[in-house]
Every structure is written in C-alpha cells, then in structure tokens.
Image (cartoon, rainbow, N blue to C red):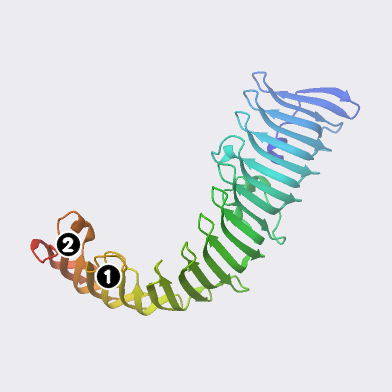
C-alpha cells in the first residue's frame, strides 16, 4: 500500500503555503479532476492528511503521514466508493487492526472478508467471514513467522494456510455453528481436533502426536453412537479398522498395513481380500448397502492386482431400474471386458449379447 500511495504522486503541480512547516499539495488529472489532495513539509515529504481520487473524482485512498511516513489509519475505496481496505500504520510500518471488505471477493458491499491483528508487519491473529457477515475462520499465527505483505494477505482467500499457525484454530458454518476446532504448536497440529455436525453434535475426534501426525480417529453417528475407529502410524492407517451402521451392525471391518488395506475385508458394499491396497481373489459386491433390502443384487468375480480378471457376473442396477436387463456375464482381462457378454433378466431370460 505504501507503494500505491507514494509512487509518482508527489511530482508537484500546485503547492501553496499553509503553515510554516507544511504546504498544501494538489495534483489534477489532465481533464482537471482532482487527483491528489495532501500536504508536504519543507523537504517535499508528505506530512499530514492525504487523499487521492480516481479519474471520476471519487475517493480512492485516505491516509495520514508524519515525516514522509504513513502513520495512523489508512482507508482504500473501490471505483464506486465502497470500502475495500482499512488498516493502521506506525511510522511507516503496518501495525494494529487491518481489514479487507467484500467487494474484493464479490461479497455484499461493506461486508468484512478478512480481519488481521498486526504487530509491526507481522500477523498475530486472523479472522475470515462468510458473505452473510458471520465468522468463518479464526486463529493465530506463530510468532516465529517472518514479516508479511499485509495488503497481499488481506486479498488472499486462504489466508489461514499462508503461515504457520499457533494456538486455537476454529471454523464455523454459515449459520454460526462451530464446525471444526484444533490446536497448533508452531504450525503443527497438537493434541486433538474435533469436527461437528451442523446441528452441533460431535462428528469426529482425531488425536495427534507431538510431530503433528494423526494417531487415532474416532467418528460418531449424529445420535452419538460409534461410527468408526481407526489407528495410525507415522500418519498412515495401521492395524484394525471397524465401522458401524447407525443401528449398530458392523458395516466395515479389516486391517491396514502401512496405509494399505490388507487381508480379508468386510465392506459396506462388498466382501473380499486385499493385498497391499489392491483387491485380489474372489469378491462379492453389492448394488446396495449390505444392510438394505434386496441383498441378492450382487456382482461377483475375481481380481488380480486390483483389476477384474476372468469370469464375472455383474448386476447392473441402473438397467434393472429401467426394466432393460439386470445381469451381465462375461470375461475380464486386466480390467477390460473381452469376448462375448450376455445380458439377461433376473430370472435368466436372455435379452441380448455383445462382443467385446
């Protein structure tokens, strides 16, 4: 902003004496509209109130100078006179409260977008707002961060990801309900985080080690019943995993090794084996969740290295709903259909065949 205000505007067009140590300075566009209305000292440096205007004569910037340096409050406006930025300087350095407003990102005029607390060009805390004016995100930055381009930061939509965070960090829904909360220590997540349903109930709790790696995640259904539990090692899923349907029956169960599913897995839409994260051997897959009706609508066949291979029988739920056919049988070769495939109704009545 200092460059914006200072660059090329004190070239001198009209200067008149006001006080012994201040001179009034005015500059105009070629069409005669006022461009700059300010004061300079005996050395030609800006001193006192400063205003700049756009080519239509609307206010663009309001500020105050002391000995050639910005000091106190600064305001910047858009072409229609709507406030864009406000901030404070201390002898040429950003210091105090800084705020950007909605017109930067298409929010309603005058709505806050980002609000920063700044200590000598270093951001200490931040807030970001929804378009309806309610708080969206708030948190603090680590004192180990370097000085920042404050103007650029105020125009950055993901301000929360630009520096190392410190202390409590919170995110909120547009209705003002807390969505997520966590603590940071010099940029690393510390302790535990919590995520919430829009109605306020806890959705997920994650625990972290001192290096910021996740070590356990527990999620809940909206009624508070356990939904799933997972453990981690070096930030990757490790060991037994289990998840439940809302009424308590197991929906998923298996084991992770170094982040990959391995061995026999019972899943919400199927059952079979994994090897190093890839499906292998015989699998049975359901067109609907296992806990729903019509469990006989299944597909079954073999996988090799994560790809369908060999003879498969597949249930086409979309075709079944349209009354076209239901069962498709044929051969896969490395995940691609090959040879003759048959399409039949659920009772086995032929519909058509197709050569691949």
Gap in Å between the C-alphas at discs 1 and 2?
Answer: 14 Å
Give 264 or 124, whichever is nearer the viewer.
264
Residue shown at 57%/48% (left/top)?
157
> As displayed, is residue 54 above or below residue 209?
above
Task: Determine if residue 187 is in view.
Answer: no
Name the one closer to the observer, 268 or 158.
268
Please give the residue where the numbered disc 2 appears in the rendered image: 326
Q: Position of residue 224 (x, y in %)?
A: 49, 65
Q: Give the total number of marks visible in the rendering.
A: 2
Secondary structure at numbered mark 2: loop
First along the sequence among labels 1 and 2:
1
Residue at image coords 22%, 57%? 318
Tag on residue 194? none
Circle 1 residues within 10 Å: few <14, some 14–19, many ≥20: many
Q: Is residue 148 left or right of residue 226?
A: right
Quarter that holds the C terminus: bottom left
Q: Which residue is rendered at x = 60% and y = 74% of the image?
A: 209
Establish if 192 lies above or below 101. below
**Dot 2 surroundings within 10 Å: few (below 14), some, or many (20 or more)?**
many
Which residue lies under the disc numbered 1?
A: 285
Give the side of residue 135 with respect to residue 265, left or right. Answer: right
Quadrant of the image occupied by residue 13: top right
Q: Position of residue 161 (x, y in %)?
A: 59, 56
Counting from the top left corner in percent of width and height, residue 169 is at: 63, 59
Q: Is residue 177 above or below residue 241?
A: above
Q: Position of residue 276 (x, y in %)?
A: 38, 78
């Amino acid at each position: 902003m200092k460059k914006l205000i200072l660059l090329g505007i004190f070239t001198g067009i009209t200067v008149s004496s006001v006080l012994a140590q201040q001179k009034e300075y005015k500059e105009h566009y070629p069409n005669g509209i006022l461009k700059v209305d300010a004061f300079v000292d005996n050395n030609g440096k800006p001193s006192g109130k400063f205003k700049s205007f756009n080519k239509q004569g609307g206010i663009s910037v309001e500020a105050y100078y002391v000995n050639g340096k910005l000091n106190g409050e600064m305001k910047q406006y858009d072409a229609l006179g709507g406030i864009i930025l406000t901030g404070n300087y201390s002898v040429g350095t950003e210091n105090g409260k800084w705020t950007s407003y909605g017109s930067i990102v298409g929010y309603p005029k005058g709505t806050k977008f980002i609000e920063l607390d700044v200590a000598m060009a270093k951001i200490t805390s931040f807030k970001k707002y929804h378009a309806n004016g309610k708080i969206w995100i708030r948190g603090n930055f680590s004192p180990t961060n370097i000085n920042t381009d404050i103007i650029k930061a105020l125009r950055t939509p993901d301000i929360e990801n630009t520096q190392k965070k410190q202390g409590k960090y919170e995110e909120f829904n547009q209705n003002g309900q807390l969505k997520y909360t966590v603590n940071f220590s010099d940029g690393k997540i510390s302790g535990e985080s919590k995520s919430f349903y829009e109605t306020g109930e806890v959705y997920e709790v994650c625990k972290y080690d001192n290096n910021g790696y996740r070590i356990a995640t527990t999620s809940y259904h909206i009624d508070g019943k356990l939904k799933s539990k997972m453990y981690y090692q070096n930030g990757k899923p490790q060991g037994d995993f289990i998840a439940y349907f809302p009424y308590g029956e197991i929906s998923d169960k298996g084991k992770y090794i170094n982040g990959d599913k391995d061995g026999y897995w019972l899943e919400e839409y199927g059952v079979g084996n994994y090897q190093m994260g890839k499906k292998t051997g015989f699998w049975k897959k359901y067109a609907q969740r296992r806990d729903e009706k019509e469990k006989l609508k299944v597909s079954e066949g073999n996988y090799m290295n994560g790809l369908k291979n060999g003879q498969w029988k597949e249930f086409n739920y979309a075709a079944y709903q349209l009354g076209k056919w239901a069962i498709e049988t044929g051969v896969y070769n490395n995940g691609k259909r090959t040879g003759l495939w048959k399409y039949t109704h659920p009772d086995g009545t032929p519909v058509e065949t197709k050569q691949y």
